[in-house]
Image (spheres, grey):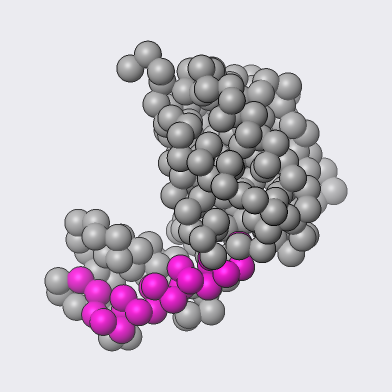
């Protein structure tokens, strides 16, 4: 489980850094598309501009959203003419293309700003992730859907796309693990924050009732359950790395790649 455990925080760090830098999208372009705000467009832009996204995959993409959030956004976007449904998949309409394209362009610019002076690490990571993604089984539904998206010509955006696919493999395993433990999205978010030592933003009463938490944090049982979820997640993801034979160069390159622009 070493490779899966070591790679996970670095992949998260790199993907989140670019996504955060890209931001929520242009409000004016959203209004031009018939939307009141960009909403969930940044979460789905890569799909909407290419192969489309199925409703259930869209829900898996944002597993911690409140019930109905994704359905409402897709339905409202379709009603506004921003999104088109074709054969069970949702695509950007001509009205939404400028907004979705601007988000992808921003991703290209931010990824290049972060990684443009680190071509050796970029090449090592890209090559190894390409192998992992190509060999991974289809059972990882979110990641399998994401790897259908054509690879961008820009090497830095392509790397971000591969890193994102890798993150989706882990997301699939993690969701399965906490659902098997009988937890809800709200509970696992709170539990993970407490497990990682984050400041207490409020403990769900259901976690207290289950014996997993008390006023000052997780109980011993809660800590054990959350730790087991992490172990199970790593066990599911680890075989993906075994196709590499020697994952050391990939892991070292992930550690070395920065998550902020070089000029800071």
Residue situated in front as seen by the camera: 134 or 119: 119
Q: Is residue 52 magenta?
A: no
Residue situated in front as seen by the camera: 177 or 6: 6
Q: Residue at x 39, y 26 (%)?
A: 260
As drawn, which residue projects farthest toward the top? 263
- x, y (%) of residue 32? 58, 20
Q: Identify the main secondary structure in magenta.
A: helix
Q: Is residue 13 above or below residue 167?
A: above
- Asked whether residue 66 is in view, the answer is yes
Q: How many marks?
A: 0
Residue situated in front as seen by the camera: 112 or 84: 112
Q: Is residue 188 above or below residue 125?
A: below
Left or right side of 122 for 49: right
**Quadrant (top left, top right, bottom left, bottom right) of the C terminus:** top left
Q: Which residues are magenta?
A: 217-237
- Asked whether residue 54 is in view, the answer is no
**Quadrant (top left, top right, bottom left, bottom right) of the N terminus:** bottom right
């Amino acid at each position: 489980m070493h490779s899966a455990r070591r790679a996970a925080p670095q992949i998260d760090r790199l993907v989140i850094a670019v996504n955060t830098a890209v931001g929520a999208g242009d409000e004016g372009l959203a209004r031009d598309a018939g939307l009141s705000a960009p909403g969930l467009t940044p979460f789905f832009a890569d799909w909407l501009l290419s192969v489309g996204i199925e409703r259930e995959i869209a829900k898996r993409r944002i597993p911690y959203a409140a019930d109905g959030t994704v359905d409402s956004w897709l339905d409202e976007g379709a009603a506004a003419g921003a999104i088109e449904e074709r054969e069970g998949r949702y695509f950007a309409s001509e009205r939404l293309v400028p907004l979705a394209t601007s988000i992808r362009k921003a991703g290209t610019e931010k990824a290049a700003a972060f990684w443009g002076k680190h071509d050796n690490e970029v090449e090592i990571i890209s090559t190894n992730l390409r192998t992992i993604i190509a060999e991974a089984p289809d059972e990882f539904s979110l990641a399998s859907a994401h790897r259908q998206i054509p690879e961008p010509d820009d090497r830095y955006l392509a790397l971000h796309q591969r890193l994102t696919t890798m993150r989706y493999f882990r997301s699939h395993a993690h969701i399965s693990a906490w659902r098997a433990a009988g937890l809800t999205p709200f509970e696992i978010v709170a539990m993970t924050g407490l497990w990682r030592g984050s400041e207490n933003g409020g403990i769900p009463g259901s976690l207290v009732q289950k014996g997993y938490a008390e006023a000052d944090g997780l109980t011993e049982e809660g800590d054990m359950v959350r730790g087991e979820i992490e172990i199970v997640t790593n066990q599911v993801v680890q075989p993906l790395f075994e196709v590499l034979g020697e994952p050391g160069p990939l892991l070292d390159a992930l550690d070395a790649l920065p998550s902020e622009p070089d000029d800071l």
